[in-house]
Image (cartoon, rainbow, N blue to C red):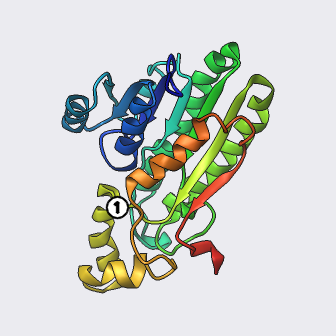
Amino acid sequence: MTILDGRTALVTGAASGIGKAIVQRMAADGAHVVAVDRDEAGLKALADEVAGVETVVCDLSDLDAVDALPSAVDVLVNNAGIQHVAPVHEFDPERFGLILRVMLEAPFRLSRRVLPHMYERGWGRIVNVSSVHGVRASPFKSAYVSAKHGLEGLSKVIALEGAAHGVTSNCLNPAYVRTPLVEKQIADQARTHGIDESQVLEQIMLTPVAVKRLVEPAEVAELAAVLYGPASGSISGTSYLMDGGWTAH
């Protein structure tokens, strides 16, 4: 038997990047995986590649649609994210609200939806894909940093409430990961900082880290597997940094 045989997992932002890597790892671990994303084509490609994955097209900014997602879930991975780079005084309030809705309120709604099932079964795992920006700040990312800091707090509250029911809740905190979201940031960062796109990786993204490379999505998936695996029962309310030494400064 594999470690998630008989378990159902739900992963948001599943069509690419970290989410896709976690879906692949969970499927290999025996889970029935519900892959959620707004990218219909990406989900179709994922389903063609990974056997037994159930796909659901959903825009997490539509909270009514979030509330209609499956509730009989044993492992929830809150991964979906969006980014916008701008100084606070120029940050579009609508965009700020959108980012918090997708990256904080949707995880709250999903957690609220699946916890009764987990409590009933006496077992559940919530894995929140946070960021080094859940524990640190960077200029021009007010919405993203606010959402990730909020996700850290939500995760800890769920850990405290869920402990008596066999439910754990934790955060993964990588530095910059080689994903479409990060690749899209390069142009935004170049414009905001007034530098060439070729300079963004070296001068912005890798400056604070000791390990001078992007994190690979599969590395994050391996750490996620620890948080739902056989050693996970006493791991709760924590934030696991995968930041290449960023916070060692």
Judge by depth and name the residue closer to the eye, 110 or 99: 110
Query: Residue 104: where, in percent of width, then height?
Result: 55, 44
- Disc 1 residue type (three-letter): Arg
Judge by depth and name the residue closer to the eye, 26 or 239: 26
Query: Residue 243: where, in percent of width, then height?
Result: 54, 67
Instruction: Pick the quarter of the image with the C terminus.
Output: bottom right
Q: Residue 48 sits in which quadrant?
A: top left
Query: Residue 143: where, in percent of width, then height?
Result: 50, 59
- 10 Å neighbourhood of mark 1: few (<14), some, or many (≥20)? some
* Residue at (35, 62) in percent of width and height: 182
* Residue at (50, 37) in percent of width and height: 77
Q: Secondary structure at mark 1?
A: loop
Whether residue 22 appears in this view of the structure is yes
Q: Is residue 96 above or below residue 5?
A: below
Q: How many marks?
A: 1
* Residue at (71, 18) in percent of width and height: 122
Looking at the image, residue 229 sits to the left or right of residue 205; the answer is right
Q: Residue 245 sits in which quadrant?
A: bottom right
Q: Residue furthest front?
A: 1
Q: Residue furthest top?
A: 120
Looking at the image, residue 105 sits to the left or right of residue 214; the answer is right
* Residue at (46, 46) in percent of width and height: 221
Query: Residue 31: where, in percent of width, then height?
Result: 45, 24
Judge by depth and name the residue closer to the eye, 44 or 85: 44
Q: Is residue 216 above or below residue 188?
A: above
Q: Which residue is mark 1?
A: 178
